[in-house]
Image: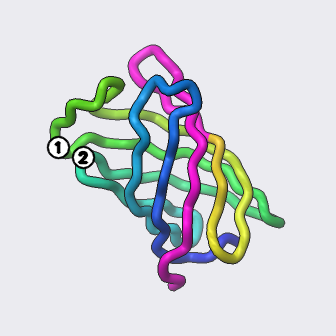
Amino acid sequence: MIKNGLYSLHAKSREGMAEDVGGVLILRDGQLHGGDAYVYYTGSYECSAGNWKGKMTSHEHTPTGRPMAARVQHIGFFGTYNETGAKVDAMALVGGQGIRYDATLRLLTAG
């Protein structure tokens, strides 16, 4: 099971179509919450034997000049995890376009 706790998030667009994003995520018993200066995230995940997958929604709370910004984005992800964090392959649906991200989560505080 991936550890419950506070994680730092860094995501990089694979095709360079969007800005890199960062923030924090709280993972707790299959639920995900977090955000950054412009958006907040809500979602859910499943994990087993070092693999995990899930979905989340990104909601804009502060207007941004990000080129691929949308008020709401739906994101699906899958990847691997260990004691210190996780790696994720994610697809964000922005308008009618899909943007792929590679993301890294680093465990800051377990709890």
The CA distance from mark 1 to mark 2 is 5 Å
Comparing 47 with 82, the one in front is 82
Q: Which residues are magenta?
A: 90-111
Q: How is the image coloured?
A: rainbow
Tag 1: residue type? Thr
Residue 64 on image: x %, y %: 20, 35
* 1 on left or right of 54: right
| Disc 1 and disc 2 in contact, CB within 8 angstroms | yes
Tag 2: residue type? Tyr
Mark 2: secondary structure: loop
User: Residue at coordinates 34% horizontally, 55% vertically from top-left?
Assistant: 35
User: Residue at coordinates 48% horizontally, 53% vertically from top-left?
Assistant: 10
- Pick whichever of labels 1 and 2 is earlier in the sequence: 2
101 versus 99 height, above or below: below
Q: Which mark is residue 38?
A: 2
Crowdedness near tag 1: few (<14), some (14–19) or many (≥20) residues, C-alpha within 10 Å: few
Residue 6 on image: x %, y %: 46, 73
Residue 92 on image: x %, y %: 50, 32
* 43 on left or right of 41: right
Q: Which mark is residue 74?
A: none
* 79 on left or right of 106: right
Comparing 68 with 33, the one in front is 68
Mark 1: secondary structure: loop
Whether the magenta-drawn stretch holds residue 106 is answered as yes
Q: Residue furthest front?
A: 16
71 versus 84 height, above or below: above
User: Residue at coordinates 40% horizontally, 45% vertically from top-left?
Assistant: 21
Q: Which mark is residue 62?
A: 1
90 versus 103 height, above or below: above
Whether the magenta-drawn stretch holds residue 1 is answered as no
